Image (cartoon, coloured by chain):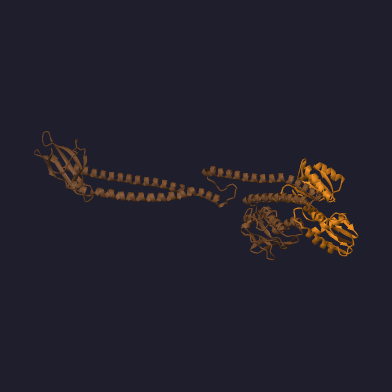
């Protein structure tokens, strides 16, 4: 997916860009509103992450201008204000959602997915392996005539396998990807979720194989 | 201990004392005037009587003779049953009458009566004497005619007048006292009205006093209002300060947290990864606490001036659930919504209610196991009951009443991040709206059930 991050704090922006790139997203960064407008003139973004306090204006005004110009690119506001009243006014101005600093990237991703789902999704945000299609926005798993909706953790786990088929992933890596870093997770949990995914994938062209002593990988059935 | 001074009592006492002094003065004056008038009348009659006797004096062969005219004495009888005495002296020798009648004040000029009061035969008597010169000899004789009368009739009159005057005075005093009581009450009515307006308001109502104020109290009310305005603005400044502090600290925290996540990805050693996890948890803990402290300050501040707008609780609940659903989704927790199909209208402060609901749901997510349900219900009967039930660890054996206390947390929370303010916030919101927060054990399983009970109006 392609993100536009509008944030004037360079340290935070750098970290966010790096973090999103780790998940395989393309991210452009603008530290001012005029730079953001310039970016939007030359590229199409799936999602905009917008900070409120910017050196050349208020992010809320930018939001309003976007909505008046009928630009529908979803906007998630990254706000340092947690007060309920601040949050409500953001939604009234046309933000699709907001997230309060400091934020959990798993939560940010979940919110992005929810926003994109409401908007009708991103056409190419899906991965295919051996005739099995995983839609990363809707969490839909399709093969043959069957279609199932995955729960959040199943989706996050399967996303890892679809990102690199045939590659072996260690249990600890999978735990990192599947749980928020603030959650306590045990290696047993991975086994539970892998068992569930195997059930989901029954009859498809893909299956998850245990590589003794190393972890798991997804291979053709 | 001294009794607190009462303006009403002081006003009443002072008016009553003035009334008493006026009444007494009235009685004294009336009595004085009346008795002097009665005395004057007696003196006039005595003088007339003495003159009439003197007129009857004649001289025969060098001797002074008197043909006592009884009418002269009978005119005295009209006053009362007083005894009458007389004495006529010629050059100091008693001619007729009571020779022992004392005459101390002898008249010096002819036909000008002299008066005196004496004590005679057991009674007080009033005397009037007239000097005449009867020409029986070449030089003529000085004749003094004295008429006296006891004063019991006069005393009776004076007494009657005194009694009447005292009665009138007493009546005046009672009337004036009653009126002063009414006057004191009526003068203090604006004060009482104002006191009522001030005491009726709750302890945290900081709106200015707008009740009708008498001019004398205006400076006091102005001072009170400006004091409350100062308090209000100080509270508001405190809220701004907390907001600003939270704001300032959140961006650097976000940087640290994001960098920690990136670093976590790059590290391989489990102990390093664990260290980063702990760090991230500490950040989340401070962020959550800051949010709750801010919510708590906001709720306290807004409770002072509760906005009462009609709002739909179903829409508000749906909105808050939608907002938190992605967070719940991270733990594969599903919101099961059992909400009425139509709107449930309630007059309240939408922002406070959202804060309450947000904190209850946030708590439920925090303390729920993965892959579980949180059930949200709205039941309307005589009250509105908005309950959130989870399948978590419940409240254990904790005292359910103490959990809404500030910073109090259940005994079985383990190492889950929390400040203990969540339920306090919800409790304060409920109470600000005239409702209560009810904590109970879940009906199914062992989870917790938190209910916001609001009066249905």
Looking at the rendered image, the quarter that the C terminus of chain B falls into is bottom right
Is B263 in front, or is B268?
B268
- Side of B271 where B138 appears, left or right: left
Is B344 in front, or is A87?
A87
**Visible in this render: residue A70?**
no
Count of marks overlaid on the render: 0
Is A158 in front, or is B44?
A158
Residue that protrudes farthest toward the bottom in the picture: B444
Q: Position of residue B116 (x, y in %)?
A: 21, 41
Q: Position of residue B72 (x, y in %)?
A: 19, 46
Looking at the image, residue B87 lies above or below residue B357 = above
Name the image quarter holding residue B454.
bottom right
Looking at the image, residue A103 lies above or below residue A212 = above
Q: Position of residue B50 (x, y in %)?
A: 19, 42
Chain B drawing hue:
brown
- Side of B446 where A164 appears, left or right: right
Residue that protrudes farthest toward the left in the picture: B61
Chain A drawing hue:
orange
**Visible in this render: residue B448?**
yes
Is B255 in front, or is B349?
B255
Residue that protrudes farthest toward the top in the picture: B139
């Amino acid at each position: 997916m392609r993100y536009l991050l509008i944030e004037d704090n360079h340290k935070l922006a750098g970290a966010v860009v790096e973090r999103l790139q780790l998940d395989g997203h393309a991210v452009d960064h603008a530290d001012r509103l005029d730079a953001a407008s310039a970016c939007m003139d030359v590229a199409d973004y799936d999602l905009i992450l917008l900070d409120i306090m910017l050196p050349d204006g208020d992010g809320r005004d930018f939001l309003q201008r976007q909505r008046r110009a009928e630009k529908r690119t979803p906007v998630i506001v990254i706000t340092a204000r947690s007060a309920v009243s601040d949050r409500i006014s953001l939604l009234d101005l046309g933000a699709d959602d907001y997230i309060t600093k400091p934020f959990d990237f798993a939560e940010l991703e979940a919110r992005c997915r929810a926003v994109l789902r409401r908007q009708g999704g991103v056409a190419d945000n899906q991965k295919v392996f051996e005739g099995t299609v995983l839609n990363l926005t809707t969490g839909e798993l399709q093969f043959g005539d069957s279609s199932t909706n995955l729960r959040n953790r199943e989706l996050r786990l399967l996303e890892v396998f679809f990102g690199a088929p045939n590659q072996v992933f260690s249990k600890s890596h999978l735990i990192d990807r599947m749980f928020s870093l603030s959650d306590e997770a045990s290696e047993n949990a991975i086994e539970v979720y892998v068992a569930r995914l195997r059930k989901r994938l029954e009859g498809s062209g893909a299956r998850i194989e245990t590589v003794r002593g190393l972890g798991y990988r997804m291979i053709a059935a | 201990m001294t009794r607190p001074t009462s303006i009403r009592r002081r006003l009443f006492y002072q008016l009553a004392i003035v009334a008493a002094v006026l009444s007494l003065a009235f009685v004294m004056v009336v009595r004085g005037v009346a008795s002097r008038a009665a005395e004057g009348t007696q003196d006039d009659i005595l003088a007339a009587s003495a003159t009439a006797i003197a007129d009857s004096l004649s001289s025969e062969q060098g001797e002074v003779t008197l043909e006592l005219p009884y009418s002269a004495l009978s005119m005295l009888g009209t006053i009362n049953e007083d005894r009458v005495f007389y004495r006529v002296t010629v050059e100091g020798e008693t001619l007729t009458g009571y020779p022992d009648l004392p005459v101390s004040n002898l008249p010096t000029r002819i036909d000008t009566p002299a008066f005196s009061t004496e004590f005679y035969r057991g009674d007080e008597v009033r005397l009037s004497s007239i000097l005449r010169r009867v020409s029986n000899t070449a030089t003529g004789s000085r004749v003094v005619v004295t008429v006296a009368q006891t004063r019991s009739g006069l005393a009776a009159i004076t007494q009657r007048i005194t009694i009447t005057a005292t009665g009138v005075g007493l009546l005046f005093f009672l009337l004036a006292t009653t009126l002063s009581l009414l006057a004191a009450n009526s003068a203090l009515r604006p004060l009482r009205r104002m006191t009522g307006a001030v005491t009726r308001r709750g302890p945290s109502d900081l709106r200015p006093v707008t009740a009708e104020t008498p001019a004398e109290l205006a400076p006091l009310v102005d001072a009170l209002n400006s004091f409350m305005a100062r308090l209000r603005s100080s509270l508001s400044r405190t809220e701004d300060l907390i907001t600003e502090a939270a704001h300032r600290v959140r961006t650097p925290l976000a940087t640290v947290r994001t960098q920690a996540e990136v670093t976590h990805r790059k590290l391989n050693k489990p102990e390093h990864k664990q260290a980063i996890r702990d760090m991230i948890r500490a950040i989340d803990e401070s962020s959550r606490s800051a949010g709750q402290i801010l919510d708590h300050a906001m709720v306290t501040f807004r409770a002072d001036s509760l906005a009462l707008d009609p709002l739909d609780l179903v829409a508000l609940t749906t909105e808050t659930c939608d907002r938190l659903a992605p967070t719940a989704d991270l733990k594969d927790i599903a919101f099961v919504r059992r909400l009425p199909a139509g709107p449930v209208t309630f007059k309240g402060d939408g922002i406070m209610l959202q804060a309450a609901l947000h904190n209850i749901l946030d708590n439920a997510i925090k303390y729920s196991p993965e892959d579980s349900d949180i059930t949200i219900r709205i039941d309307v009967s005589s009250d509105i009951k908005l309950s959130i039930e989870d399948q978590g660890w419940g409240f254990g054996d904790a005292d359910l009443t103490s959990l809404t206390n500030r910073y109090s947390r259940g005994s079985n929370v383990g190492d889950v991040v929390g400040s203990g303010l969540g339920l306090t916030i919800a409790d304060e919101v409920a109470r600000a709206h005239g409702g209560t927060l009810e904590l109970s054990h879940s009906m199914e399983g062992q989870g917790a059930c938190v209910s916001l009970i609001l009066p249905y109006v």
